[in-house]
Every structure is written in structure tokens, then in C-alpha cells.
Image (cartoon, rainbow, N blue to C red):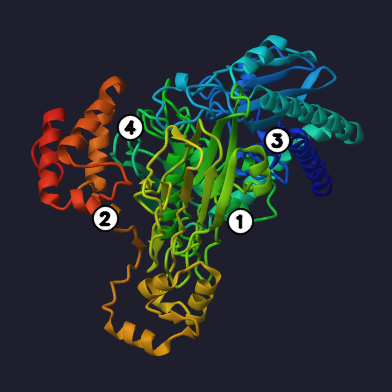
Amino acid sequence: MKLDPILLEIMNNKVAAVADEMYFALKRASRSIYVKEAADFATGILDTDGLLFAHPPSATFDFLIDTDYASTIRAVPDVEPGDVLFTNDPYLSGGLSTHLPDLHMIRPYFHDKKVVAYGWCFVHCTDIGGAVPSSISPAFTEIFQEGLRVPPMKIVKKGVPNDDLFKFLMANSRTPDVNLGDLNAMLGSMEIGERRLADVIKRHGVKAFLSCQKDLQDYTALKARDVLRRIPDGTYEFWDFMDDDMLSPVPVRVRVKLTVDDGCINIDLTDTDPQVRSAYNVPTLNGRNYWITYRLTSILTTYDQTMVKNAGLYRSITVTNPPGTVMNAEFPDAVGIRAEPARRLHHAITGAIMKARPGLLPAPSGGISTPFALAEYEADGQKRTVQVVEPMRGGMGALEGQDGVDARDTSMNNMQNHPLETVEAECGILVQRYDVRPDSGGPGCWRGGAGQTITVEILRDGSAILARSMERLRFPSYGVFGGKPGSPMQAFLNLGRPDQRELSKIHLLSVKRGDTVTFMMPGGGGYGDPHLREPRKVLHDVEMGFISRDGAARDYDMVITDGGVDEAATEKLRRGRVKENVRADFDFGPEREAWEAVFDDATMSRLNRALAKLPKSVRQDVRRRLFERAVPDLSVPGGGQTLADVMGDADAVRIRLTDAMAEAFGEPAGMTG
């Protein structure tokens, strides 16, 4: 049975409305700030094969549509009416969950004793156990340190809650009451979905309901391929870097080869760096996963906003995803910070598409989201609480004809900030500053968006700060077609005081009453030559606080005074300034250029292929020894040392690397040419 277009549109609106009602029911009933305010959760309705066909229009996430729900469904085959499945384990769920704090539920929906659909929802919970409050640290080396692992199982059986599982979950969390509230909100959302779909089936019949599942996906698949045809046929390669893996100072590269053929796209991750020993690994389980495709998701949903959001979006996208890289973790790799290599892939795919069709996409955004959490003891000194203070954001990249959005980054999702009144009411902190960070957006004819900055004062002794996804400390987001990179991230303890300390990546930062912690988020890349930016726009940016007066002079050759633009001083500055060469393609900044003077694409590809042949148990040790020998003075960002300092004699570094690789792999001298 294939539905006529009018009935299909009616069915689409009805099932989307059901998913939306599920979404708001979960949000209203939840307990945690991160769900109620930031909206780090989702709902949806799956077809009988476990593919998503109904997505809530109000959701902050679009890319979760490309998720393997079917593996969890297959793992618990004996389902009955009233059952609800639960899991949070990336490996045992087939990648449904991608780190342990993401709690997923799936409920089979029955009609005449047959499954006709599944309801699904997830929340990011405040704490699921593990070695640190909030359960996430980049320093973890295996998933066992990251919290409680729950394989796919029934949390409700025939309508009766599994009390033993609930007790087990609560006993393994620092925030059991908050978690229990969120779990109950999830169950309520699943119940509402079943009731509303039963109404749809009663009105239109089960055959029409089952047909709409496939018909909607077929419709989306055709429209999605039309959008992807905007990218010219060909093969395009690009790569980007994480600063390091925290356990060593060595940068980590994510590489993509994009092959386009009449709207069909293959994403090839071959020659991406090996998985790391810390938590910067993505559990994609050899296949396609939303962390791989979400750059394409944003293209699809931007260039055809009438498209129905469902699994059909990805029908013409394939992935070549070899095991053992940071984009394809292997058990028991830690995966808590899996978003960061995925964001570097996002920016690599952006660069590849810009090579294919300049102007189709904006410059890359600031490229990170840093939810930082406060762990503290309550006034009685007994009970410990954990709260995410703010999901800090960078700015968005500039687009031809348009500046980047300031203090927001919707390139991955549209999560909201936490109201400061709520934060201060529930946490022992005082927010001293929450603002836009001046001069953080990449200079350009169209300026990159500025990042956020926040300073909080700690009000209680015995507290600790946790911050995941601290990246872009060394390698900022690149500028395009004459635009400059955004500013890198910075973080400080007690900024401006005698005991000021610049922070790099944080495992668990102990703080005391009176301490301050400051996060300064990176900006998006600029687009076009900054000297072509209209003076009135530069003046407006200075007046609004997006650019400082020093920044206007440094980056735009403009002198701004209280009276506006000092035209005489500006003309003198511009005459005396020797213009830098304007890059026709990409400006990666001095740190990456210094690094790639030795560790170029050909060298890194050969190195990674050699490492891939080694057993996993020794791969990281060999890799680390190679870099320590080649660059013995390399340190993590944040200490004032630059890569230009340690890579100053590129020829000497290259010789040491050649010798180290020859010793490790038996390669002939000169193989890094």
C-alpha cells in the first residue's frame, strides 16, 4: 500500500506531532537542569526495522536521526506489550549510546499483538558513576572508569518497573534523585507516544500507518539526494587536528576523503590517527554513525527546509570506516569525550566541501562546546551534588556576505544556555561575568562569530570543577579565502591575581572558596580579506564589544577613537603597514603550519598505515615514542610554548623522525620526504 500525497502529508504531520508531544512531556517532567534548560535530550518514533521516521520539530538535535537503534532492539528480542528497553553502553548497544551518561529507552508499540513501531528517547544524565563527578574526564583510559555500563535490557516488563535495575542505577550515581526524576520523565514520554499513535491508527488504520513509515523515508531520500547534488562530482580530501589527547602532548589528526557521484557520497576515514589511550575516541562500531554524518545533516536540513527529517536523509551516504582509529573505537577504549574528534571531522568535511564548491558552506565555527560542571558538598558537608553550570559555546564561522553568529554555535545542535538565576540558586557559585569574548572571531571581510566568556567565583570549600571538551587551545578554527583563524580557547584559575594559572585540559580541578575560574571560548573562522571590511562595520563591532580598539588596528588597519574612525591615523597606519599575503584558500594559523612543516599529509598517512599493522596493545606506546624522539620538547598548550618554538629547526625534527620510524618499522631512510 502506497499512500497518496495528501494522506502522506496528513500522516507526517500527525506522527511528527506525536514525537513533539513526547519531547515536551519529557522536558516538563525532568529534574536535571541539563535537560530542563539546556535540552540535552531527544525523542522519536522508529519503524518496525528500527529506523527513525518521526522526529520532533522542536528538538535541539537533528543529527541523532542517523543512529543504530536496531542493534538494541535485536539484543532483546522477546518483547511484550508494556516492555521498555534501556541501555547506556556504547559497545553493547551497537552505538545507540555513544558515551555512558547518555541513557536511552526504546518501547515497542503493539497493535493486534504485533509490533507496529517503537518509541525512543534519551537524556544526558548528570552522573552515572565512575571515577569523577559527572562521569566524564578526558584522562580516563578505558570505559570501565567512566561509570556504570548497562547492556540492553528491560527496565519495565509488561508494565511493571524492574525495581532491581532502578536500585542498581541509583546506587551507582552521585545524583540518584535527579536521575530517577529524569528516568520517570522518559517513561512518561514513552507512554504518551503509545497512546497518541494508537489514536492515529484508530483514525487511519494500521495499513496506512505502516505504509507512511516507508513512504516518508522514500520521499526524504529523494529530496536529500537532490540537495547533495549541489556538491560537484569528484574526490576531495581534507584534515583537521585536535590539540592532543591529554595523556600526551601529541596532536591528533582526523582525515577525510569525500567522494561525490551524482548526489551519492562516500566518507572515507582511512589514514585518520589511531585511537588514543584517553577518552577522545568515537564508538562507531565500523559503520556509519551520526558523529560521522552530522556535517552533511546540517547541509541537508539547511538547503531544503521542507524535507521530512527521518532516516531517509542518509540513504545515499556511505562510510569507509576502518577499525582502530579515533573515529572507530574498539572495546574497551574510553569514549567519554567522543564529540571532539567528531567535531574535527565536521571541520574536515567542511574544508573538503569548500574545495568542491566555495561558498556553499560558512567557515568553521569555534568548534567546541564546553559544558563545565561544579561538584560540591552541600551545607551539611555530607551530600555531594553535581551540576552543569553552563554549556559554553564558541562563535559560528562567517559566510560569504554574512558575519558569523556571535556567542552561539548551532553547527551541531541548538542547545540552550542555563539562566544565571537558576545556576546561582542551585550551585555554590557567583557569576562575575558572562559575556561575549572580544577579538575572538576570525578577522575577515565577513567576521567570524565571537565566542562566549564566563568567570565564576567559588563560594564553598571542597569544591571541584570538571570541564569536558576543552579543545582549540592550540589549533584554532581556520579562516577561508583571505579570512583569518578565530582565537584559540583559553582558561584560567584566578585570572588577574598573583596566583593566576593558565589551564589546559581538566581532569578534576580542586578549588576553594574565593577562587575564580574563567573560560574564554574560541571564535569562528573569518571569510574574505579583512582589509575589505567596511569601516562602518568595524566601528559597529568596536561599539558592540565584539572587537577591541587594539583589535581594529591590528586586524583591520583601523584606528578607532571616542569620536569614531580617525581617518588620518587610519590612512597613516595603512600606508605604513606591509600587508600580509592574503591566502586564496585556507589560513590555518602559525601553530598548524609549523607542525605540518614536518608532519605533512604524506608523512602522517604513511605513519598511520605502519601503526595500524601493529597490535593495539603496543600501538600507542610506539606512536608516543616516535613523537617524543622527533620533538623532545613538545608540551601541552597553555604553558606559553608554541609549536614554532619547538619545531624551529624543521630539518632536524624531520631527521629524528626518519630515524625513529626506521627503527620502529624498518623503513628505509628518507621515507618521510
Q: Residue at x 19, y 36 (%)?
A: 628
Separation (CA) of disc 3 from disc 2:
43 Å
Q: Which mark is residue 453?
A: none
Q: Which residue is mark 1?
A: 302
Question: What amino acid is labelled 3 in the image?
Answer: Thr
Q: Position of residue 141 (x, y in %)?
A: 39, 24
Instruction: Tell me the element at label 1.
Output: helix
Residue found at x 80% / y 17%: 81
What is the C-alpha distance between the residues marked 1 and 3?
21 Å
Q: Nearer the viewer, mark 2 or mark 1?
A: 2
Q: Choose between 598 and 496: the one closer to the eye.
A: 496
Instruction: Specify few, some or many for label 1: CA neighbours under 10 Å numbering under 14, 14-19, or 20 or more.
Output: few
Expressed as whole percent of the image width and height from the top left, the position of residue 71 reads: 59, 23
C-alpha separation, residue under disc 2 versus residue under disc 1? 32 Å
Q: Nearer the viewer, mark 3 or mark 4?
A: 4
Q: Quadrant of the N terminus?
A: top right
Q: Quick one: which residue is furthest to the left in this view?
A: 669
In this rendering, is residue 273 above or below 499? above
Q: Amino acid at mark 4?
A: Leu
Q: Which residue is mark 4?
A: 247
Query: Closer to the N terminus: mark 2 or mark 1?
Result: 1
Determine the residue located farthest toward the bottom in the rendered image.
568
- Crowding at dot 4, Cα within 10 Å, few <14 / some 14-19 / many 20+, comes out as some
The residue positioned farthest toward the right in the image shown = 203
Separation of marks 3 and 4 at Cα, in angstroms: 36 Å
Please give left or right for residue 591 compared with residue 83 in the image. Answer: left
**Which circle marks residue 593 in the picture?**
2
User: How far is mark 4 from mark 1, CA to CA?
Assistant: 38 Å
